Amino acid sequence: MSHWAVPRLNIYLRMLTWQKKSYVCEDASEVTLSGIAMLPGVGVFGTGTTARVLVPLLQAEGFEVHALWGRSEEEACGLAKELGIPFHTSQSDDVLLHQDVDLVCIYIPPSMTKQIAVKALGIGKNVVCEKAATAVDSFKMVTAARYYPQLLSIMGNTLRFLPAFVEMRQRLLDGYVGEIQVCDVRVYGPSLLDQSYGWTCEDLMGGGGLHTVGSAIIDLLSYLTSTRAHRVHGLTRTFVQQNGLIRGIRRVTSDDFCFFQLLMGSTGSGGVCCTVTLNFNMPGSFVQEVMVVGSTGRLVARGTDLYGQRNGSNGEELLLGGNGWLGPEVKEMPLPHLHGLSSMVKALRQSFQAHEERRSWDQRPVAMASTFEDGLYVQTVVEAVKKSSSTGEWVSVEIMSKEPDPNQNLCEALQRNKN
Amino acid sequence: MSHWAVPRLNIYLRMLTWQKKSYVCEDASEVTLSGIAMLPGVGVFGTGTTARVLVPLLQAEGFEVHALWGRSEEEACGLAKELGIPFHTSQSDDVLLHQDVDLVCIYIPPSMTKQIAVKALGIGKNVVCEKAATAVDSFKMVTAARYYPQLLSIMGNTLRFLPAFVEMRQRLLDGYVGEIQVCDVRVYGPSLLDQSYGWTCEDLMGGGGLHTVGSAIIDLLSYLTSTRAHRVHGLTRTFVQQNGLIRGIRRVTSDDFCFFQLLMGSTGSGGVCCTVTLNFNMPGSFVQEVMVVGSTGRLVARGTDLYGQRNGSNGEELLLGGNGWLGPEVKEMPLPHLHGLSSMVKALRQSFQAHEERRSWDQRPVAMASTFEDGLYVQTVVEAVKKSSSTGEWVSVEIMSKEPDPNQNLCEALQRNKN
């Protein structure tokens, strides 16, 4: 199958939207007009690949995207025109305070996510967002989410919505593999760096394979196994520190290779060993394989397909896959993420459609979503892996329970000077 | 392709031998009768799968197997009859001192290997053997090999002889992948335990995935990359401690799951990161995948096939494979090892055929073989991984340079008592 560029996807999804609208007219009892009218208006932050793909997916499901934020007026204006969004701005408040916006989707550099997400909740808007840059930021987001439990606040890890992983989790709960022993994950692909120097090149800004892809895998593993990591070990490397576009005094500090191990579940020898290998020095391919091995069988998700083999059987059986994603591919976004994003938008539609009031939502369709609490856990594991990589030791995962004193370093320095 | 049992292989190889003999009569100039006559007589230690497969392979190449040793008279007698070996015994000296035996092949439990190998060299016999159980044993074997440099002494790691890996190494030397960054190895398969309780169940006896399969991979990685590990980290687990056959007070202590990382080459950030995952809780499948990723491309050996992809190309190309092994499969031995064993025997034939005198051999055909020095390195890495698994820390690989004092513990205890 050939890779289609994003504009082709937009055309495809517009067609779907038109089809749906005419369908509604023909048989109003199936999908009520009021049901679509009650969907919340959406404001989107970001002009990157995910935002470009997300907007047409939202529109295809009946959401109206009212406002778009970009870092510059030009970026925002260009994309808003392209996607048919009536309002664009480079001022975040203009989106957050927009009267037609009830749901805010935040797909911006990690270092800016916390500020927008917390503010959006404070103004009373529902939030779907990507990960923050640090555990402290994640903690602040958790605090906000706890303070506004009536608002939807989910991390946009699309892998949890991918049908292959939903099915995999259900099979694991049903005992397909028996007692889970080992999870083995590999993600290989081309460089994650942007064309120009930016946050993707900076470890501290949330760039790199561990932060970008590893965090989605860490989250996925806890979703699949219904448990969390208590000890981690890992190593990160930056093999390509300069390239044709990033050179001179500039160097990439974010990792392009990373492997880590998570010990999950019970702390004794009975727990689950997870090994994850991420390699983004492999242009021309995208491989994502998630294998769970248990006492009586195993399950493997390759891309968007799920395979299984029980001990004693002769070969693998295809449990789900092949024909899950009917839309065109997007070159910039691997199929599991594209398909997962599409499933997430469908789940959001179901969640909001269940209620009459356009800001109300139903928990059930988005039950598999990653919460802000999950986001904090994931960020904590990511930082533990980084720490392990620098110390070479196993690191315990300790979830922050109160905000660290921002003046702690200062206080310690003063203390030292006094002695 | 169906799995054939060992007896089927024997019949197949006998046929090959007959064909070769008649072929020799027809065209004596091609393979001289004297060439075959000059091959050394062979004595084989062991009655396990490898020995059962090795003997017919040797016979097919024109070696005469004169003597077989088994742990019991019954075992030795049964297999000798089956394979047409004229002499059998359970006394090791009877094989070592056998006047027609010039080459000794040792495929016995690791804890017994050192004793036989060292003695064989001392008597002036050429030796092909499997790994020993400890680094101390390996060191004693190295000492013996250094003392008799005119004798052939190689470790029987068959993977080095597999054409896919010979080709892979050559491509790596030719710069196919550019600068090597990452090696990623996975071996999955069914349990390595014997039917009854024995050394395969015991970590200290040299059982387990790390010792049995991991050591072959450690050796292979140093062969492929032409470098050695300086730091290692790993974790071993025994998920299945008892089964239908091993129960009651008996427990398996050898690992059935293991992952480890090797930092190889230069000690700075420029070295090679190797990750190895071994899982032997996967009945019904055998997967062996060795991937080397470099700055300009990658090479992957899956089973006995070699694939490559250069950066910028659209897909993988098959570099070698498909039709390498024409013989039947052996259920008990994975194809890469079977094919590698066959290639090793061919190389041995070429090595001995090059000289008139039946004990003399040529270095070149067996140049890729693992030496006893390599065996000591591998054993040192295996023990470092075990140490890392128990301490949780990275462990430096320090090759033994003199034999440790066997009374060291005793001396230390006396010292402590004195104080």
Image: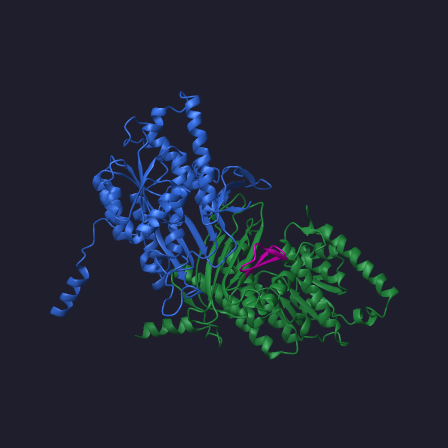
Chain colours: A green, B blue
Q: Which residues are magenta?
A: A298-318
> Which image quadrant for residue B18?
top left
x, y (%) of residue A395? 41, 66
Q: Is residue A101 visible?
A: no
x, y (%) of residue B307? 53, 41
> What count of labels does the image hold?
0
Q: Which residue lies at the image location 38% right of the left edge and 52% below the top edge?
A: B212
The image shows residue A98, relative to residue B113, as above or below, that is: below
> Which image quadrant for residue B384?
bottom left
Is residue B147 shown left or right of residue A54? left
The image shows residue A1, relative to residue A96, as above or below, that is: above
Q: Nearer the viewer, residue A283 or A305?
A: A305
Is residue A144 shown left or right of residue B185? right
Name the residue furthest left. B418
Q: Is residue A307 magenta?
A: yes
Name the residue furthest right. A26
**Which part of the image, by quadrant, shows the N terminus of chain B?**
top right
x, y (%) of residue B150? 24, 34
What main secondary structure does the magenta stretch of the protein show? strand
x, y (%) of residue B229? 35, 49
Q: Nearer the viewer, residue B128 or B267?
A: B128
Q: Nearer the viewer, residue A380 or B217?
A: B217
**Which part of the image, by quadrant, shows the C terminus of chain B?**
bottom left
> Which image quadrant for residue A16?
bottom right
Q: Is residue A288 magenta?
A: no
